[in-house]
Amino acid sequence: MLFNSLTFAVFLPLVFMLYWFVFRHSLKRQNVLVLLASYVFYGWWDWRFLGLILLSTLVDFFVGLQLRKTETPKQRKFYLLLSLCVNLGLLGFFKYYHFFIESWIDAWSLFGIQMHASTLEIILPVGISFYTFQTLSYTIDVYRKQLEATRDFLQFATFVAFFPQLVAGPIERASHLLPQFANARRFDADFAYSGISLIIWGLFKKVVVADNCAFFVNQIFEGYGHLNSAELFLGVLLFGIQIYGDFSGYSDIAIGVGRLFGFSLQTNFAFPYFSRSISEFWRRWHISLSSWFRDYVYIPLGGSRGSLGMHARNICVVFLVSGLWHGANWTFLVWGAVHAFLFLVPLLFKVSQNHGRETQLAGYQFPSMLLTFLMVCLAWVFFRADSVPIAWDMLGKIFSFEGHSLGVFYKNSKSLLFAVITVVGIFVLWLYEFLAVQGNQQEVRLSRYHAIFIGVLIVFMGVYKNPSDFIYFQF
Amino acid sequence: MTAFLKRIGIIVLGIFGVSMLVSMGSLWALREGDFYKPSFLVNGVSTSDFDYIVLGASTGLTTLNTKVIDSVLHIEGINLSMDDTSISSQYLMLEHFLASGKHADICVLASSASSYDAISIHISDNDYRFLPYVSRGYISDYYASFSGTAAGVSGLSKWLPMAGVGYYNAELFYPSLISLVAPQHRNRFDSKGNYTYPVGSGASKRILSRHPKTIYFKNTYLAKIKALCDSHDIQLVCYVSPLEQQEAILEQTSYDVINHSTLLKDSRYFYDAIHVNTLGRHVASLQFSEDFRSYVISESFDKLRMTE
């Protein structure tokens, strides 16, 4: 079920009504309703893959209980390994099987040895990367004794399958979300209204900003060979804005829906394109994943402790794994490597990157903000291109500085119309976010009249006939 | 909870209210202008009695130049074809034509060769152009007879115009702004409803062979068009436009058909495989006029006999 679908527009109010009007006196019944709603939400896409979520839930619940019982380090390690093997095994099979088989065959072909492998038709279950990491955080935290394992299967199953953030995050930590299923919920009108405000803003980012950008981005990335530097450069910038609108829009809706049911989900995007350095960008972009890698990969590897070389190694590992998490393709690995490089350069030259997230923007910081935005957008080329050679080719064409006509944006009246809508959409996005940043807000808050204004823009500027799928569904 | 629902209610009502007003204004502006064919027929065409009309998809729109046909045969016709439509849309256009108080002696159905047998459960891509008239029963009934999101949204627009105008915002809302400023502006067709594709830079190449394509005239909307024509004393003539790679083979049929699928023997007349360019249109329109002459004469003779 998609957030921007009519089905969801019926589903959400229905579940909301049942939750607050029928089951409000029983925490258990509310949890049962949320669990059922979550399974319906996921099963709407393909009910067969509900088995995977259930398997993951059962294994991690069992592992949690065993870790609670035993103090023997060997046994604790065994249970942790069991959880890692099952979760990462499923993720590896569904997401990376083809990639590793094909890479293996390609590697041998370099030595002139031709191999053939029978390939399986494997469908990637939506959201597997997200809920796998969420359940892993539970097991690891219990293993580290940072969290007490729950004995309530219903609460745990609801935590794993919680529908607002099940398929594209934010990746919640068990220590943050799980206790919320154990506590009685009271309806808070202001909190719920902030959720509605986020839902409207998230929808605007998705259907107005991202989907209009997609109109050009798809044309430019598919026909890059016939386009000039200026067109490609703008296409790359538009993809940067598209992926932001798409993914952060989804996160906003997820957080907003969570709030309607009295749940607080963590902020996933904090106006990342206002960052003044790459390290600040990563403190603002996909925060739930970045912090996951920080806590479960970077710090266990040693973090910033030790020599500069060790520190650099740890950063490289995190970015490469993060790249691979996004998809089973060399393009994502290179994208991760590029970010590792961009992150390391100021570190090696001891350039300060310590901008607080809450700091207001000053005029003199505009160049560093623009430079960061450009670097991030150019790195997105690897993320979006079909292969690494194509990405290099595109970058080569951009930096050849040949041609300045922007014909792709006005080749016919439809393109011109979409160009105008896209520019207006981006301007509105930028304006609201700029005002939020200057007001030290963590998110865009829409007053009643602003909510109506943005709602009307969604109706008349959104893309409904040929909407794009949420980009992060493929991860 | 009450305070929350009140707050949400105001926002929802606000969005609905403003969107409904804008949408109704948008459909009104389109109804008052000439932007799309359905409103052009109502506002931009003063003649109400035509010798013939051309209904069709892009093939009809770009092949039969009514200006040429009119000048050769000294008659009056209009091209009501719309690109990206099927025979069901042409049936709707005929209904719309008649409901707008117009009449024609002959209806030339110039749909694409594949359309004569195809039947779709979904509305055509450009059927939204009838949305400004969705309050008319035959239009809303038409949308209701199809399944799919587009048909559902279009049908819903009778009561909730924001559904259709929002869904087709690029196709309806923004053009309505143009209609508001310039009501006479037409969307890529001339004062007689024609449009043409430019001559490309491709070299001249003799067409030596074509794949045969049998047309069975099985599309159920064809029978509906025939019935509607009969009930309004209109003669129906089917037309198969020139094709670059196919030859239309006609099965035994009761329909009058002019088959020009193999008329043009050189690729320089074509814009693409199924559309002619300006050169091809001129040749095809001249030949059509000749083939069409007998229908016009017979129709005039019938008229004269009835007058006597």
Image (cartoon, grey):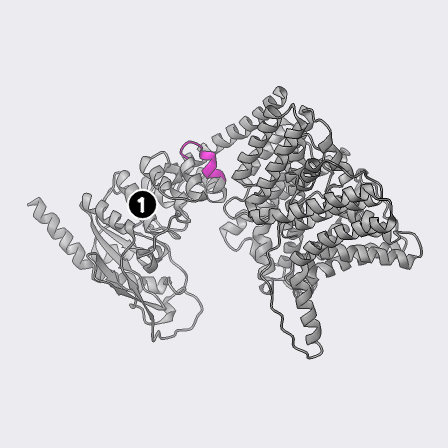
The quarter of the picture where the C terminus of chain B appears is top left
Quarter holding residue B291 = bottom left
- The magenta segment is B157-166
Q: Residue furthest bottom?
A: A112
Residue designated by label 1: B93
Q: Residue A202's spot in the image, x, y percent?
A: 64, 39
Q: Residue B54's spot in the image, x, y percent?
A: 28, 52
Pick the front one: A222 or A66: A66
Whether residue A381 is visible, yes or no, is no
Q: Residue A308's spot in the image, x, y percent?
A: 91, 57
Give the overall secondary structure of the magenta segment.
Answer: helix
Q: Is residue B164 magenta?
A: yes
Q: Residue furthest top?
A: B2
Q: What's the residue type where badge 1 is placed?
A: Met
Q: Is residue A16 above or below residue B197?
A: above
Q: Is residue B217 above or below residue B136?
A: below
- Within-10-Å neighbours for mark 1: few <14, some 14–19, many 20+: many
Pick the front one: A205 or A293: A293
Pick the front one: A473 or A338: A473
Q: Is residue A188 left or right of residue A118?
A: right
Q: Is residue B223 left or right of residue A186?
A: left
Q: Residue at x 28, y 45 (%)?
A: B94
Q: Residue furthest right?
A: A306
Q: Residue at x 28, y 50 (%)?
A: B220
Q: Residue furthest left?
A: B308
Q: Is residue A23 above or below residue A169?
A: above
